[in-house]
Amino acid sequence: MFQKGDYVIYGNNGACIVDDVGPLDIPGVPEERVYYTLVPFYTRDSRLFVPADHTGAVLRALVSKEEILRLLEEIPSIEPLFVQDEKQREARYKETIRTCDCRELIRVMRTIEQRKKSRLAIGKKMTASDEKYFRIAQDNLCGEFAISLGIDRRQADAFIMEKLELDPDQAETV
């Protein structure tokens, strides 16, 4: 069980701070049910109320600095996704991102970067879908890494892009 002040990842909301743990004082909500009140770290003007016994979106602790450093060293061995059918590509990206697993987010980013290079080599642009899912994976990963490493989000972005062997300035254009 998480405690007040813990940082967590909650689905596509990304990094959140546990602001409170306990029953909600809202009419119609069972008084015996315990909820986490989460504040998304990068959009502090909202609150999320998640039952402590929820079974929906991923709710997990942030990865540690040690886990991040180990994962970054493993980047060269993380294989891109292989999706031959273009129609299934977006569904696979969604499914992979929904896991909120840092390794899988890197896998999506590597896949899209590889596709981008292949498309550019034949005179085609990056697809809007690829650009969208690259940005989602990048935002989720950078947000979590920035908090865990105690650095600015832009620094985390440049750090990850360097490890992925991408130009850090490309972070703004991918």
Image (cartoon, helix red, strand yellow):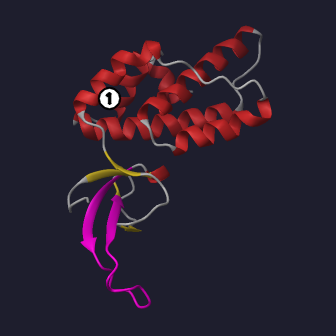
Q: Which residue is drawn at 71% across and 8% down?
A: 121
Look at the image and tell me whether residue 117 can be seen: yes
Which quarter shows the C terminus? top right
* Among the 4 quarters of the image, the one containing residue 153: top left
Q: Name the residue under label 1.
A: 155
Give the crowd class for mark 1: few <14, some 14-19, many >=20 residues within 10 Å: some
Q: Is 89 drawn above or below residue 22 in the view shown? A: above
Camera-nearest residue between 3 and 170: 3
| Direction from residue 54 to residue 98 in the image, left or right | right
* Mark 1 element type: helix
Amino acid type of disc 1?
Answer: Gln
Camera-nearest residue between 114 and 126: 114
Image location (x, y in percent) of residue 20: 25, 69
Q: Which residue is drawn at 45% across and 53% down?
A: 13
Which quarter shows the N terminus? bottom left
Look at the image and tell me whether residue 165 can be seen: no
Q: Is 7 drawn above or below residue 128 in the view shown? A: below
| Direction from residue 170 to residue 60 in the image, left or right | left
Magenta segment range?
Answer: 15-39
Residue 19 lies in the magenta-colored region? yes
Q: Which residue is drawn at 26% across and 65% down?
A: 19
Identify the residue at the far bottom of this view: 27
Image location (x, y in percent) of residue 100: 46, 42
Q: Is 77 drawn above or below residue 111 in the view shown? A: above
Q: How many labels does the image show?
A: 1
Q: Residue at x 54, y 21 (%)?
A: 110
Camera-nearest residue between 12 and 43: 12
